[in-house]
Image (tube, rainbow, N blue to C red):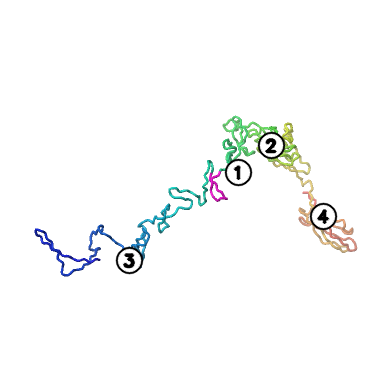
Amino acid sequence: MRRSTTILRTCVLTAGSLCIAILPALAQTTQVDLRSQAKGVDFSRAVATKPFKTGITLPATCNVGDSYFKSDAAPGQNLYGCATANTWTVESGGGLPSVTGNADHLLGTNGTLASWMALGGDVAGSPPSLQVTGLQGKRVAATTPTSGQVLTWNSTALNWEPATVTSSSGGGPVTNTGGDLSGAIANATVTRMQNKPVSSATPSDGQVLTWSQFSSQWQPQAPSGGSGGGTGSGSGISVLGVTYSSANTLTIGAGCSLSAPCNARFGTNVVAITTSATVTWQSGAGIAYIYVTPAGTVTVGSNLTVICAGGCSTAVGLAGFPVNTMPIYTWTALPTGWDSAGGHDARAYLSTKVLSAGTGMILVESGPQSTIGVDVTLVPTFTTGAATLAFGTLAASSCSVDLTVAVPGAIVGDALASGWPATMPASVLGMMRVSAPNTVAVRLCNLSASAATVASNSYRATVVQGR
């Protein structure tokens, strides 16, 4: 602390108010403790104040609460405090980092210190005129877009750039619809509902849109049952026929519908055709054979190039109606398309095939199929087996051991028809019998007075079965 000299003043109050200062004989030095002796100290009028130790090197030691002004540190980072004994910490809250040389930078922090940071990543430029130059780290081209273009990735230039949207075929701007719509955008047609096809047939007054399981599409049909306009009892059946529509198109089953199906019977099964079909000629000349399969599929078989739509299918390489099918029509195609007078009806208004089971025969009806079999209680069946056997040399007046031939299905007691090799010696007699299930035993006996050699050969056994 600063030393002070005490000056004693003696004042004599007279008419002139004279005050005389008297110095003590010996000057006294006192110590003033501002912490405990001062009260309400005000340094605002002081010429200068320096409350901190000052220098360019932090003291090696410090006590908690000490402060130090490091004069060579960056402005705003000069003040240090001792929060832990002998450890100085810069008091960074005292100011901002220097702005010198940091134009267009933003104030940021790394979690420890504040600093000015330049803009980067997907943006560039100064804050007043900031520009997005990338997306998720992918560069965006500076090309000026035109009306209707979209941002598209260019894998060659490795950047996003404006481009005109093209169709899946790459033929130019998108002008056609997709999904449940068909045609140009300005004139789209609903061809499906929930991805289920809708028939293009023109509906009649009062018809409703009905699902056809046969043709797998929605199609207009007269309502039936319920409280609608139908009677609930249908309107009978329609006849499945073929009509000429144009040089390119034949129509099959024009009158077939849910309320008036075109029925076809195969044995005890009846299949219902409830929608019409079209056959479009594309090329070739010859005859098309139109028929129904036992599964109820209308089929067009030919050597022509045709397209079948609306619930029918095609078969190639046919020169006639396949067996086990129901013929409907034949139609001749000229090199220029269908012959308008080329249709020939192959249907029969009523037809059937009567099968009777004769003696020893069995007839089994199962759906559209008739199966003819044999009554084994009346007609014997035959099972045959063969094997190469080697009996070797038989001694005079002796028989061989039994060798066997496998005959699947043979039962002990079945009758046998023996098949002997032509080279068997005349003095050798053979015998066969079913010795066990599926097994026929063969034994040879030499009836002569001398030995007989039997060469290895094939022996065949036929079992005759009648139950």
- Mark 4 vs mark 2, foreground winner is 2
N-terminal of the pair, mark 1 or mark 3, is 3
N-terminal of the pair, mark 3 or mark 4, is 3
Of 48 and 325, nearer the camera is 48
Of 236 and 172, nearer the camera is 172
- Mark 1 vs mark 2, foreground winner is 1
Q: Is residue 432 above or below residue 233?
A: below
- Left or right of residue 389, residue 240 in this image: left
- Left or right of residue 244, residue 4 in this image: left
- Mark 1 vs mark 4, foreground winner is 1
- The x and y percentages for residue 114 are 40, 57
Residue at numbered disc 3: 63
Q: Magenta stretch: give its range.
A: 150-163
Residue 170: numbered disc: 1
Residue at numbered disc 2: 280
Residue at numbered disc 4: 460
Looking at the rendered structure, the kind of residue marked 2 is Thr
- The x and y percentages for residue 241 are 70, 33
Q: CA distance from mark 4 to mark 2?
A: 61 Å
Q: Residue 341: within the magenta?
A: no
Looking at the rendered structure, the kind of residue marked 4 is Arg
